[in-house]
Image (cartoon, rainbow, N blue to C red):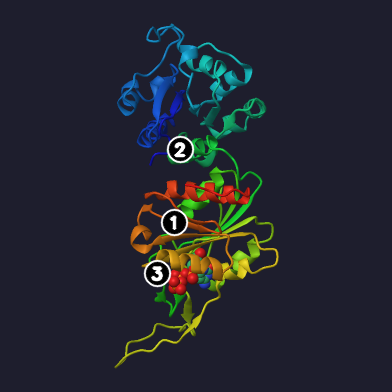
Amino acid sequence: MSEFRGKRIVLGVTGGVAAYKAAELVRLLVKAGAEVDVAQTAAGAQFVGAATFQALTGRRVWHGLWDERMDSGMAHIDLTRGAAALLVAPATADFLAKLAHGLADDLLSTLCLARDCPLLVAPAMNRQMWENPATQRNIAQLRLDGVSILGPAYGEQACGELGDGRMLEAGELFDDLYASLQAKPFAGKHVLLTAGPTFEALDPVRGLTNSSSGKMGFALARACVDAGAEVTLIAGPVSLATPRGVRRVDVQTALQMRAAVMQSLPGQNVFIGVAAVADYRPRQTAPHKIKKGPGSLTLELEANPDILAEVAALPDAPFCVGFAAESRDLAAGAEGKRVAKKLALVVGNLVQDGLCGDTNAVTLFDAAGAHGLPLADKSEVARGIVAHIVALLGGQHVQH
Ligand code: CTP
């Protein structure tokens, strides 16, 4: 994880129970390479102590307007200079009201006014406070002022009630913050992906499948969303969380995957087939468990449709990208698939480099030749693939 390498984030913590999630967020950000400066309001310091944030960030926590640590004596201005973003999480109803009116009577509210970096807020409050017209008015005003509002979520609240107002989880805030800092070359584009294995049932408990984890496809879906695309992900049976902002359709079999793809296809600009689709399915699925008997068992298989080839052959086909996992002769296998299926791009990898793990080393094959990407985390590889697709869509030749 290196999403925030070289970036400094200022995290404002106001007085809400959800401050404990801010501590977890700091941990995630630091792990991803960020430098994090925490500024707490007086109420915020009542919930999670400065020592916790200090230990997690390795830096002193900021509290008052009159802090003498900044040489200029201008902590209210200097702290956000050069920062990638200022995120207030949790942001109480009271703090949002202050922000909407431009009040600046403590360090954090002053930092929010005197900044040249993006401001994001993660509301955290009781559902009635959230639904109150005053809060809604303030939120609408903050949106107009260009402030990004992250959440809130629906769920159980500290007061025991159920409703809107719960702060997003640390991982969700991490993803939203990261996405907000990315360029949006895919804005206005629609991307459809398949991911994971398929499962072809032999009987109610057994089936044909493969060891695809779905991680590469899910990482790509996320990279496409981060780049500004509207993303639909048709997923085979995997137990991965849906990336934020992605529309997900779960399927089991290749036939279901094909039907879901065809249904979602109208209006798509890009189709990326990442799924390891079973090439064959049992000719028959037994309605009851197949009992063992003497001797061997013969299964009769029939071919599944090639979803990617079918999409690429359509007269109004989107920009089509395929994956080729080979155990040897990568270039010949991948380039062969690109030509045979009439694809703009094939992402090739050797199975020993990518299957199931968290890293991958891929080579991109397009009409201009082969372009290797270095071995990296799948999320970083996904960003490299998205950059390549964006360049190809823009008509550029790409050198990596
Ligand atoms: N694909 C598909 N539908 C299928 C099979 C594959 O959409 N029924 C897509 C995959 O998502 C991937 C690419 O096609 O993008 C893989 O090509 P394929 O020729 O199927 O790879 P293998 O099955 O590994 O082929 P082979 O066994 O011939 O190497």
Q: What's under tag 1, amino acid-wise? A: Thr
| Residue 385 horizontal/vertical position (percent) | 50, 51
Secondary structure category for the residue under label 1: strand
Q: Is mark 2 within 8 Å of ligand 1?
A: no
Q: Which residue is mark 1?
A: 363
Name the disc covering residue 246, or none.
none
User: Where does the N terminus fall, quadrant-wise?
Assistant: top left
Residue neighbourhood size for the residue with mark 2, other residues' Cα within 10 Å, grouped as few (<14), some (14–19), many (≥20): many
Residue 186 in picture, x, y percent from top left: 61, 45
Q: Is residue 324 left or right of residue 339?
A: left
> Which residue lies at the image location 50% right of the left edge and 69% below the top edge?
336
Is 57 in front, or is 52? Answer: 57
Mark 3, residue position: 210
The x and y percentages for residue 316 are 70, 63
Kindly tell me whether residue 38 is visible in this rendering: yes
**Which callout, 1 or 3, points to the residue nearer the camera?**
1
In the rendered image, the vertical position of residue 209 relative to residue 294, given as above or below = above
Query: In which image quadrant can residue 24 be found?
Result: top left
Q: Which mark identifies residue 174?
A: 2
Residue 252 in view = no
Q: Viewer-proximal residue, 360 or 11?
A: 360
At 67% from the left and 27% from the top, the residue drawn is 144
**What whole-number distance in Å separates the C-alpha atoms at marks 1 and 2?**
29 Å
Residue type at tag 2 = Phe
Q: Position of residue 219 (x, y in %)?
A: 46, 51
Q: Earlier in the sequence, mark 1 or mark 2?
A: 2
